[in-house]
Amino acid sequence: MNDPGPPPSWNAPGKDFPAAPSAYHGVGLVPPAGPARTWGLAVVGVPLVLVLLLALAGSLSGGGSGNSARSGSAWSGSSGWPGTSETTYTPDPTDTPVPYESDTAPSYTYEESATPTPTPTPSPTPSEVDATSPEAVVTAYFAAINSRDYATAWSLGGKNLDSDYDSFVEGFATTESDTITITSVQGDDVTLTLEALQTDGTTKTYDKVYTVSGGEIVKSTGPERSTEPS
């Protein structure tokens, strides 16, 4: 049996062998130790910590609101759960209802009544009601004389007191104005006191009775009472 002898040495002189390969590193999720691993852990760890903190804060706030809701009102019933037929809700007397607020003012519509308001009828004046009464005829007669409307005075009864129109008008030539005071009215007879102021300043006073028929004076009686200076 042949002896092969010792194995050749890698460093034997005159031999040119390749250098020994470097150590093999397998591919994995965690990078090797160094700045890369530190940065990777920071990138992954910081978001996880934030998510945990947010979840913890949410659970704490939810528990607080639930406790305040349970302390704000009392529930009683055999089942112990609200909303069942056996549950009675007792409001907290300290709860204050929130008033309704609206930025829009309510609008109101005013509708006029369909029934028109009746217009009052003016009451007729005494002259309109009884324009041909004995008192009204006598008053209109002397008003026409004072305004020098002798034609109207003639139609109101002057034609029955004088036979001629010109003579009737001449009878007032010395009369400045007539003032009458009616003392009584009995049927068609109007009793009055006539004060005739003359152009010379004197006053003639008469106690007269005028009888009216058909809207005009038909008769005049009564003497002159006296003549007095004005």
Image (spheres, rainbow, N blue to C red):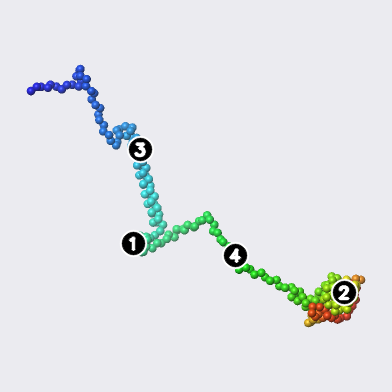
Q: Position of residue 178 (x, y in %)?
A: 85, 73
Mark 1–mark 2 contact, CB under 8 Å? Answer: no
Q: Is residue 18 visible?
A: yes
The percent position of residue 201, horizontal first and vertical second, equals 90, 71
Counting residues from the N terminus, which is met first, the one under dot 1 or under dot 2?
1
Q: Reading the chain from its start, which is encountered first: label 3 or label 2?
A: 3
* Label 3 crowd bin: few (<14), some (14–19), many (20+), radius 10 Å: few
Disc on the earlier residue, 4 or 3: 3
Q: How much space separates mark 1 and mark 4, taking CA atoms?
A: 60 Å
Q: Amino acid at mark 4?
A: Glu
Q: Position of residue 230 (x, y in %)?
A: 89, 72
Residue sitting nearer the eye, 10 or 91: 10
Q: CA distance from mark 2 to mark 4?
A: 62 Å
Q: Which residue is mark 1?
A: 79
Residue 114 drawn at (x, y percent): 59, 67
Q: Secondary structure at mark 4?
A: loop
Badge 2 crowding class, 10 Å Cα cut-off, few under 14, some 14 to 19, many 20 or more, is: many
Element assignment for label 3: helix
- Residue topped by disc 2: 196
The residue pinned by badge 3 equals 43
Between circles 1 and 2, the one closer to the viewer is 2
Residue drawn at (37%, 61%), measured in percent from left and top? Answer: 83
The residues bearing labels 4 and 3 have C-alpha atoms spaced at a distance of 78 Å
Badge 4 is on which residue? 112
Locate residue 37: give its quadrant: top left
Q: Residues within 10 Å of mark 1 (few under 14, many from 20)?
A: few
For this orientation, the residue located farthest to the bottom is: 187
